[in-house]
Image (spheres, rainbow, N blue to C red):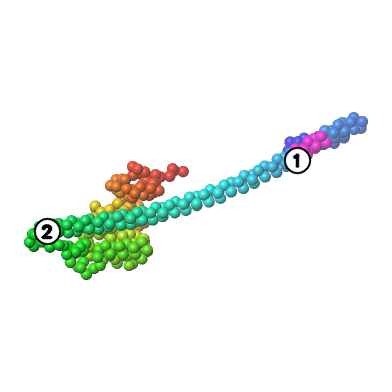
Amino acid sequence: MRLRNNVAWLALAALLLAAVLPAAAANKDIIQLQTQVQALQDQVARMQQSIDMNMGALKNLVEQSADSVNKMNTAVNDLQQRMQGQASDTNGRMEQVSGQIQSLHDTVDELKSRLAKVSKQLDDMQQGGQNLAAGQPGMTAPAGPPTPGADSNPAASQAPPANVLYNNALRDYNSGKYDLSSQEFNDYIRYYSNTDLAGNAQFYLADIEYRQGNFEAAARDYDKVLEQYPGGNKAAAAQLKKGYALLELGQREAGIRELKSLTGRYPRSIEASQARDRLRRLGVTSGGTVNKPPAR
C-alpha cells in the first residue's frame, strides 16, 4: 500500500515539475521520475505476485490441515466406537463365562453330594453285612437309597427325585427356557428346601428375573440367597448380581455399597474381580470416593 502511495506521489510530482520548470529541465526530471515510477510499479507488481503465490500456498496448507484434522477426528471416533464395542463384548463374555463357571460349580457340588451319599450307603451295607455275618438279631440290610430331602419334607415323595428335578431345571435354564426352569427351581425349593442345592435354586430364580429385566424382583430374590443361604456357594454371585440389579434400578449408591461389600467379604473370588472392574468403570476409587471430571 505504501509503494502504491509513493508511486502516486511521484506521478503527481512529475506533473507539478512539468508545469513549473522550463521545458528542457522538465523533460529531464520527468523522464527520471517516470523511470522511478516504472521501477516502483514493477516492484509493486512483483510483490503482489509474491503475495498471491504465498496466499495460495497458505490457503492450500490450511485446506490440507483441515482435511487431516477431519480424518483424525473420524479415525478417533471409529477407534472409540470399536473400543466401546470391545468393552461391551468383553463384559458380556465375562458374564457368560461367570455363568458357565457357576453351572460347573453346581455340577461339581451335586456330584460331591451324590458321591458322599453313595459312600454312606456302601458303608451302611458293609456294616449291615458284618452284622448279619455276626448273627446279631434285628439287623437287616438297608432297603435302598433314600430320597434326598424326603426325611425333612414328606411332600417330596410326590415329587421327582431331587437330582433329576435340579438337573432338569439347570438344563432348561442354560437353554433359555426360563419359564419352565423357574417352575422347576420353585418346585425344588418347595420339596427340597433343606438340601445343599436349595440356595443354588434360589439364586437361579433371581437370575432368571434379572435376565428378563425384572430387576426389582431380582434384587429381592438375590437378597434371599444372602439371608437364607449365607454359607452357600452362590453367596458371592448373589451379592454381585444384587449390586448390578440396584445399578440397573438407578440406585447408584446402594449398588456401589453392595459391590464394595462383596470385595471385602470375598476378596479372592471371581465375583470380587468383576465387582472391582465395575466399580472402576463407575469411577469409584479403592477408597470409595468417586472421580469427578476437572472443572472447566
Q: Residues within 10 Å of mark 2 (few under 14, many from 20)?
A: few
Residue that mark 1 sits on: 49
Residue 133 badge:
2
Q: Is residue 124 visible?
A: no
Above or below: residue 108 compared with residue 143: above
Foreground pick, 128 / 193? 128
- Judged from this view, the residue extending furthest toward the bottom is 158
Is residue 43 on the magenta stretch? yes
Residue 79 badge:
none
Is residue 200 on the magenta stretch? no
Above or below: residue 187 compared with residue 56: below
Q: Residue at 65% x, 43% y: name it.
A: 61
- Residue type indicated by callout 2: Ala
Q: For the residue labelled by badge 2, is the local secondary structure a helix, a strand or a loop? A: helix
Q: Residue at 90% x, 33% y: name it.
A: 27
Where in the figure is residue 40, as x and y percent of width and height? Answer: 79, 35
Where in the figure is residue 295, as x and y percent of width and height? Answer: 44, 43
Where in the figure is residue 211, as x and y percent of width and height? Answer: 36, 60
Foreground pick, 116 / 202? 116
Foreground pick, 125 / 80? 125
Image quarter in which the N terminus is found: top right
Q: Residues within 10 Å of mark 1 (few under 14, many from 20)?
A: few
- Asked whether, in this view, residue 45 is left or right of residue 114, the answer is right
Q: Residue at 26% x, 55% y: name it.
A: 112
Residue numbers of the magenta segment: 38-47
